[in-house]
Image (cartoon, grey):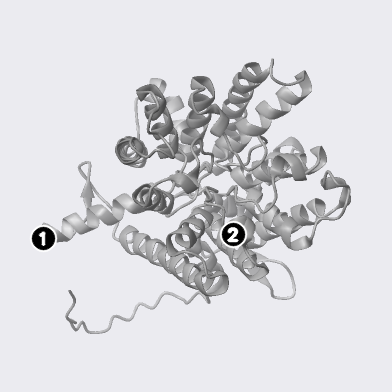
Amino acid sequence: MQRFKLELGSGWRLTPPQVLVIGFAAVILTGAVLLSLPLSSTAGKPTPFLNALFTATSAVCVTGLVVVDTATYWSRFGQVVILLLIQVGGLGFMTMSTLAAILLGRRIMLHQRLVIQEALNQISIEGVVRLTRAVIVVTAIIEGTGAVLLTWHWWGLYPPGEAIFQGVFHAISAFCNAGFDLKGEFRSLTGYRTDLLVNLVVTSLIILGGLGFSVLIEFINWPRERYLSLHSRIVVKTTLVLIALGTLLILTIESYNPATLAGRSWFEKLLCSYFQAVTPRTAGFNTIPIADLRPATLFLIVLLMYIGASPGGTGGGIKTTTFVTLILTVLATVRGKSRTEVGNRSLPAGLVPKSLAIAFLSLSLVVGITIALLISEGKDFLLTLFEVTSAFGTVGLSMGLTTELSAVGRALIIALMFAGRVGPLTIAVAVAQRQRENHIRFPEEAIIVG
């Protein structure tokens, strides 16, 4: 963690994690104010601020959980506000700020570069502005391609202007792993369960957004440089394994569930299973009713949502690399090795405790909020755990609990979505009092564990 602090006058200094926390909070509050205006609702009436705040948080934190139907409750102005919040939340407000500075011809100062490094989860400050430019270009190309394909596919189903807006909205929502849709009645994409183009376009956007921008850029440069970092190799392999394993397990469990896939063709079963294995990582769309899934499938999705996407992308969760680091560390310990190794490389010693901290803080949040909601809402355990993990992983899949939450429950989910997007470790570092490195080493004494 960089020791740099941003001077704001009167002795008040902000670290990069604090800038990120405050920046995301400011964007959310701005969005909430806009969504609470009468102009934002189809009824032309002010929206209760808690509902507006919930929707703005869900959009900026690219979650997709909603308390009102996006297609019918919000006016076109409100939907555009949500779309802009999704884009800012998916790329990060620092990326958007850097874009504005580049367009205005301003120089990117050191403190801005440090915050960008923190926001994009980069190891070094070197090349972060160049990476930001590449992120913007790659995002425009991928989202633009998805928007064109979806618009073309829906051209005959809607008036031209509506088809374009539907295509752009769903492309951005999918790439940013947000899960917001405009299909109405909380149906998500259940009406397109056999539509091959919609399924493939949406899942491709979700996967690309979840891989992380540094990985995407390495793949773009691969034909010229012929190099993929250890990080990229781990991210791609883990993503493929989780999707393949998730597809196989969902197909196996749900094939004979009369409420979901029983009686369907094998093509439809495979397509739905694949889509539902991709979307917990962490997009929130669904083509089969989530509430009708069997408990084993729901728990599998909870695990996938907890793992989430990869660092430096648009998804949430503890991240694939954190998950792999913990598994490799366990295997190394079982084999009697003192170092965690993968791909003929040894992972830095500081990476393991950081991964443990992320996993522990994340699990503590999920467990703590689950217990709090069980007390305040009095609902079923798996239903509550599913909704909480969906909020933490910024997924947006729902069994229907979100719309029934009390004011206390909604406030808890708002806080959890924020923590899931910014990162529990980033928030902890931003709040904690950083101490100077102590070079004194105390004598060792063992304790008994296990």
Q: Nearer the viewer, residue 439 or 246?
A: 246
Q: Position of residue 121 (x, y in %)?
A: 49, 50
Q: Nearer the viewer, residue 127 or 187?
A: 187
Q: Residue at x 23, y 57 (%)?
A: 329
Q: Position of residue 419 (x, y in %)?
A: 55, 61
Q: Residue at x 77, y 20 (%)?
A: 159
Residue 199 appears left or right of 274: right
Query: Within the image, what quadrant is residue 185 found in?
Result: top right
Residue 228 appears left or right of 132: left
Q: Label 2 is placed on what type of residue?
A: Phe
Residue 126 appears left or right of 42: left
Q: Position of residue 322 (x, y in %)?
A: 36, 53
Judging by the rendered image, the residue that carries numbered circle 2 is 418
Judging by the rendered image, the residue that carries numbered circle 1 is 336
Residue 196 appears left or right of 236: right
Q: Residues within 10 Å of mark 2 (few under 14, many from 20)?
A: many
Q: Label 1 is placed on what type of residue?
A: Gly
